[in-house]
Image (cartoon, rainbow, N blue to C red):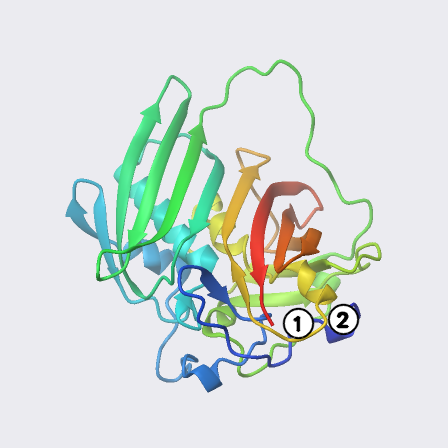
């Protein structure tokens, strides 16, 4: 069982991702070596595109359709990092319906490999007095569906009671935390982030991973888009309980915002992935995100396939 924090799956090279067909491949950890699969993009040959630039690069085609060509710096193997592909969907929805209320929740399906050339299609499923459901789909150049998301936007209204978001009791702030080293052959997308260790470590658990994370370039992002783009950064906590190295595949991601005004200090967010149960090649993961003051801002659930 691989449970030791110092030897977790963020800083060392790993096996290349499996070719699993209709699922979204993610390497085994942020330090996974992609060179053997011919998928690592050298920084000097492919200047990174900031997250906000992906939204700015959406070319309107009319009737809620957009084309994006080029997402350098966001790939991980033959597919795009899930936070970036989901952000493209969110950005397309926001561009199509600019007067939407705050984002409340999202349900994402990673259906197939998302390349750096996609067409986004936006559909208003239903809009009511306070809640709107918007669907976005991403299609590859052949027209195949590779990503689907349903976004729930909702206006604030008087509440029949209140329960505040959870707050961490004790933690070391990001300004005092140690920078987390990344392997030079890590997948391209992780260059977009800065990571730091989180102390104290989570309570002993064979499937929990926690890190401070922030985007290198945050200009031009609204706070909801930033959380969509950063919320899926960490690999699943279940990797700490695997017996052998092997590729993994995120299948879906559902999340709920716990505030209608997410905010933090200097771009730092504390992310955690924790396995709720791992067996028969699958893991159920809870994803949590706190701001720099330790107040929870978003919580999610994800299904992950593990191979090897």
**Distance CA(mark 2)–CA(mark 1):** 10 Å
Residue 100, image x, y percentages: 36, 31
Residue visible at 79% across and 53% down in the picture: 171
Q: Secondary structure at mark 1?
A: loop
Residue 304 shows in the view: yes
Residue 205 marker: none
Depth-wise, is mark 2 or mark 1 nearer the camera? 2
Q: Secondary structure at mark 2?
A: loop
Q: Is residue 174 above or below residue 13?
A: above
Local crowd at mark 2 within 10 Å, few (<14), some, or many (≥20)? some
Q: Please give left or right for residue 45 compared with residue 270 in the image.
A: left
The residue singled out by tag 2 in the image is: 2
Residue 14, image x, y percentages: 59, 79
The residue singled out by tag 1 in the image is: 9
Q: Nearer the viewer, residue 279 or 156?
A: 279
Residue visible at 28% across and 36% down in the picture: 123
Q: Are marks 2 and 1 in contact (CB under 8 Å)?
A: yes
Residue 220 shows in the view: no
Q: Is residue 258 above or below residue 6?
A: above
Q: Please give left or right for residue 233 compared with residue 210 in the image.
A: left
Q: Please give left or right for residue 284 compared with residue 39 in the image.
A: right
Q: Is residue 282 above or below residue 294?
A: below
Q: Nearer the viewer, residue 265 or 275?
A: 275
Residue 18, image x, y percentages: 49, 72
Residue 48, image x, y percentages: 39, 72
Quadrant where the N terminus lies? bottom right
- Which of pointers 2 and 1 lies earlier in the amino acid sequence? 2
Q: Nearer the viewer, residue 170 or 60?
A: 60
Local crowd at mark 1 within 10 Å, few (<14), some, or many (≥20)? many
Q: Quadrant location of residue 268?
A: bottom right
Q: Residue furthest front?
A: 280
Quadrant where the C terminus lies? bottom right
């Amino acid at each position: 069982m691989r449970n030791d924090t110092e030897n977790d799956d963020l800083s060392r090279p790993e096996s290349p991702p499996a070719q699993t067909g209709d699922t979204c491949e993610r390497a085994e950890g942020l330090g996974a070596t992609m060179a053997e699969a011919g998928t690592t993009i050298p920084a000097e040959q492919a200047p990174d595109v900031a997250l906000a630039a992906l939204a700015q690069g959406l070319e309107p085609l009319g009737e809620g359709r957009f084309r994006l060509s080029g997402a350098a710096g966001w790939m991980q193997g033959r597919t795009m990092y899930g936070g970036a592909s989901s952000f493209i969907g969110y950005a397309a929805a926001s561009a199509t319906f600019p007067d939407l209320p705050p984002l409340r929740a999202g349900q994402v399906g990673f259906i197939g490999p998302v390349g750096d050339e996609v067409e986004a299609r936006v559909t208003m499923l239903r809009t009511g007095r306070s809640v709107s459901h918007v669907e976005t789909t991403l299609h590859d150049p052949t027209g195949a569906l590779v990503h689907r998301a349903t976004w729930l936007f909702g206006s604030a209204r008087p509440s029949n009671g209140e329960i505040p978001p959870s707050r961490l009791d004790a933690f070391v702030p990001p300004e005092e935390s140690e920078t987390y080293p990344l392997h030079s052959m890590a997948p391209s997308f992780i260059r977009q982030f800065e990571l730091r260790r989180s102390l104290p470590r989570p309570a002993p658990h064979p499937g929990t991973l926690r890190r401070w994370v922030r985007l290198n370039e945050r200009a031009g992002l609204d706070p909801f888009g930033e959380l969509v783009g950063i919320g899926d950064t960490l690999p699943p906590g279940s990797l700490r309980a695997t017996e052998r190295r092997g590729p993994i595949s995120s299948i879906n991601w559902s999340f709920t915002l716990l505030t209608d005004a997410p905010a933090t200090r200097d771009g730092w967010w504390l992310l955690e992935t924790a396995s709720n149960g791992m067996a028969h090649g699958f893991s159920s993961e809870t994803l949590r995100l706190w701001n720099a003051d330790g107040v929870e801002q978003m919580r999610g659930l994800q299904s992950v396939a593990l191979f090897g």
